[in-house]
Image (tube, rainbow, N blue to C red):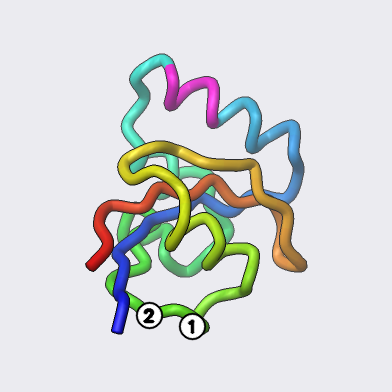
């Protein structure tokens, strides 16, 4: 079964997500921004969600993690929780 490891930053607004994505593109550290701004419990771990299989996250989240390019920040992705910036570290 496929598995992936990803990290994310969850914020309330698209504007905040866009601002953080720009900082990441300019070289900011993902884990530092996640610890400071993310509203998810994973913020304490720099946004690290660990390893998981398909169907463990929201469908839209899985679409990014299991289909989009690795080691690239994707988003903002809107879900019922807010706006996510997602980076898939690896997939098997």
How far across and down, in percent of the image, does residue 42 sit? Answer: 42, 65
What residue is drawn where x is 31% and y is 67%? Answer: 4
Dot 1, crowdedness within 10 Å: few (<14), some or many (≥20)?
few
**Is 27 in the magenta?**
no
Using the image as rendered, state which of residue 54 and residue 44 is in the foreground: 54
Q: Position of residue 44 (x, y in %)?
A: 36, 61
Residue 74, above or below 60: above
Provide the residue span drawn in magenta: 21-25
Nearer the observer, 72 or 92: 92
Question: How many marks on residues?
Answer: 2
Q: Which residue does the numbered mark 1 point to in the structure image?
A: 56
The mark found on residue 71 in the picture is none
Quadrant where the N terminus sits is: bottom left
Q: Is residue 23 magenta?
A: yes
Q: Which image quarter: residue 33?
A: top left
x 46%, y 48%: residue: 68
Percent across and percent down for residue 83 are 68, 50
Q: Which mark is residue 53?
A: 2
Q: Is residue 32 above or below residue 68?
A: above
Rendered residue at 64%/42% (across/down): 76
Q: Is residue 7 left or right of residue 10?
A: left
Q: Check contact, mark 2 vs mark 1: CB within 8 A.
A: yes
SS assignment at label 2: loop
Vertical order, 21 against 84 (above or below)? above
Q: Is residue 23 left or right of residue 69?
A: right
Q: Quadrant of residue 50?
A: bottom left
Residue located 53% across and 76% down the image = 57
- Vertical placement of 85 versus 18: above or below? below
Q: Residue 6, position in %: x, y? A: 36, 59
Mark 2 residue crowding within 10 angstroms, few (<14) / some (14–19) / many (20+): some
């Amino acid at each position: 079964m496929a598995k992936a490891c990803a990290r994310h930053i969850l914020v309330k607004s698209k504007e905040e997500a866009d601002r953080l994505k720009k900082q990441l593109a300019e070289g900011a550290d993902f884990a530092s921004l996640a610890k400071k701004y993310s509203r998810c419990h994973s913020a304490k771990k720099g946004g690290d969600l660990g390893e998981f299989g398909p169907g463990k996250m929201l469908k839209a989240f899985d679409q990014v993690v299991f289909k989009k390019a690795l080691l690239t920040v994707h988003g903002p992705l809107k879900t019922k929780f807010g706006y996510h910036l997602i980076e898939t570290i690896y997939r098997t």
